[in-house]
Amino acid sequence: MALDDLHANFLTTQLEKVVNWARYRSTWPATFGLACCAIEMMATGAAHYDLSRFGMEVFRASPRQADLMIVAGRVSQKMAPVLRQVYDQMPEPKWVISMGACASTGGIFNNYAIVQGVDQIVPVDVYAPGCPPGPETLMNAILTLHDQIKSSEILKREPAAS
Amino acid sequence: MFLPGETHRVELTRERGIVTDVPEGTEENLSAPEDETMIINMGPQHPSTHGVLRLMLELDGEEILRVKPVIGYLHTGMEKTAEELLYIQGSTNVTRMDYMNPLGNELCFSLAVERLLGIEVPERAQAIRVLMAELCRINSHLVWFATSGMDLGATTVMIHGLRERELILRFFEKTSGLRMNCDYVRPGGVAADLPDGWVEDVAEIIEVIPRRLHESRDLLDDNPIFQKRMRGVGILTRDEAIALGATGPILRATGLAWDIRKAFPYSGYDRYEFDIPTQEGCDAWSRYQVRVAEVNESARIIRQVIETMPPGDYRVQDRKVTPPPRHRIDVSMEALIHHFKLFTEGFKVPAGETYVAIESPKGELGCYLVSDGVPPAYRQHTRGLCFYHVHAMPSMMVGGLVADAVVVIASADPVLGEVDR
């Protein structure tokens, strides 16, 4: 390949922007549906709301292939270690959306069985309110996360605290 | 099918697959068993377990020798929470059990409270309840259709099922303000009257959905792969189904026309004409046929509800049970007091106990309620029908192939929110 072609066929940009662009345009979520919110998460991925517009319709069954964990639903004490394990299995960089009141704060279930906020187990980037949040709310949370990823510094992201 | 007697501890540890359960210093032999079987773990985070169900499968090659369902990963303590909530708040709690059938859960709870109170809701409220319950049935079967299709690799029907469901959810949102977990059916009636234009909305739903479902069925019914995976898989005979407490489409797929709506009519179901679809196959294919036929029957009931919707109140006009209309609060001191007392103390339910069962989309949903006379219920127990279906899964799976386990889970249609509560 000769250098002669180069006057027409290249762009200049910053590495960070390219990397962030690639990351936010293909944020693949892990399937982590727990309760009612999971149904709304499925509805978001299906025809009417069409999550694939944002390059994220591929819900990965394996956490090894996922970048984003949408904790959709109430997290029980028994599920908490499983959730953490799935989170640990995801490769860096990874993000977490806490979907719904139960995942964010325990919701109406302030009792012995439910973890009062998934942020006690994993670091959460975006909280989506609602019980359950409608697909619009989830998409808003996702777009907020995209903004965060877009403006993040790729060299400075610290690994999640354990 | 089930292990007789006690399971040895070593065996248990081997099954659980986690060594963390064994206290330090235990010298027992945890090495691999001598036989050629393999125990694998499916779930709780698995895309085709319809939630957080965990199954332990003992396999000989591809054949399933034993199955142990492990539940509790979504245990929410709802029955305990119900002991802290007023009866007027109870619907909010129970609606989150079976999240495919939120209004059915509320209906069951409300019927139990009303039976203890000894009140009869107005005819219009009953008709609205039937309308919403049947819409929920269609909704539930559509989600079943979608997710089961996805489990078998038919992603198109998943897209179709969830697309059709949006019509119903939009109507729920218009009526109650929420797409799911509506908290619309409450003790004493329903929360609000149907919105303007509900006839057109519902008429569109029952015109569009059966037609489109028929189109989607064309993709599956003659599909040889789908047929081979469904026919003769997950056999549960009638005797087994009755012995294990399975109800709903699973029981009706064994040829027994058992439906609470016909057997013990509630909410005025005896006013409507409908049939109970049954099949004789006892397998996953029959359950599929039953569910699809039930969608058509539900549409038939809804059509009758539209035609015969009676005028009148949408809740009982008993100020000790339902709040006064908003405009009365501004002009009537008594109404203000009633409103205040109702939402702070709640209403009192006479001491006693009752059990009410309804036909949810998946089977017999029951609510057992004990009142000691003061507002928070003394005990509220739900007959979570999916629990029985999970319990019946080993009988359906044993002897089959491991790939059929997915079909069995799909055909049993468990909702783990209700199993674990």
Image (cartoon, coloured by chain):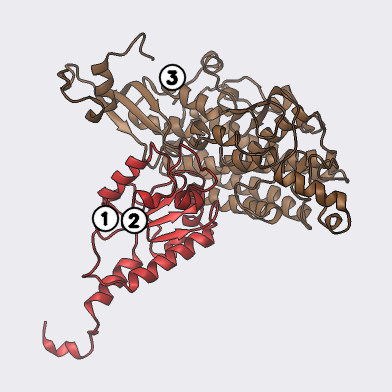
- Name the side, left or right, on which B17 lies relative to B222: left
User: Label 2 to label 1, Cα distance in Å?
Assistant: 7 Å
Please provide percent x and percent y for residue B218: 54, 44
Residues B212 and B32: in front is B32
Q: Chain of mark 3?
A: B
Q: Which chain is brown?
A: B
Report whether residue B60 is seen.
Answer: no
- Name the side, left or right, on which A4 lies relative to B205: left
Query: In the rendered structure, which amino acid carries the disc numbered 3?
Result: Ser
- Disc on res. B210: none
Q: Chain of mark 1?
A: A
Please provide percent x and percent y for residue A6: 18, 87
Residue highlighted by disc 3? B395
Dot 2 or dot 1: first in sequence order is 2
- Name the side, left or right, on which A104 lies relative to A123: right
User: Label 2 to label 3, Cα distance in Å?
Assistant: 41 Å
Of tags 2 and 3, the one toward the viewer is 2
Residue occupying image coordinates x 69% and y 26%: B372
Quadrant of residue B22 within the rendered picture:
top left
- Disc on res. A161: 1
Furthest-left residue in view? A2
Residues B3 and A56: in front is B3
Query: In the rendered structure, which amino acid carries the disc numbered 1?
Result: Ala
Q: Are marks 3 and 1 on the same chain?
A: no
Asked if the residue at tag 1 contacts the one at tag 2, i.e. Cβ–Cβ closer than 8 Å, the answer is yes
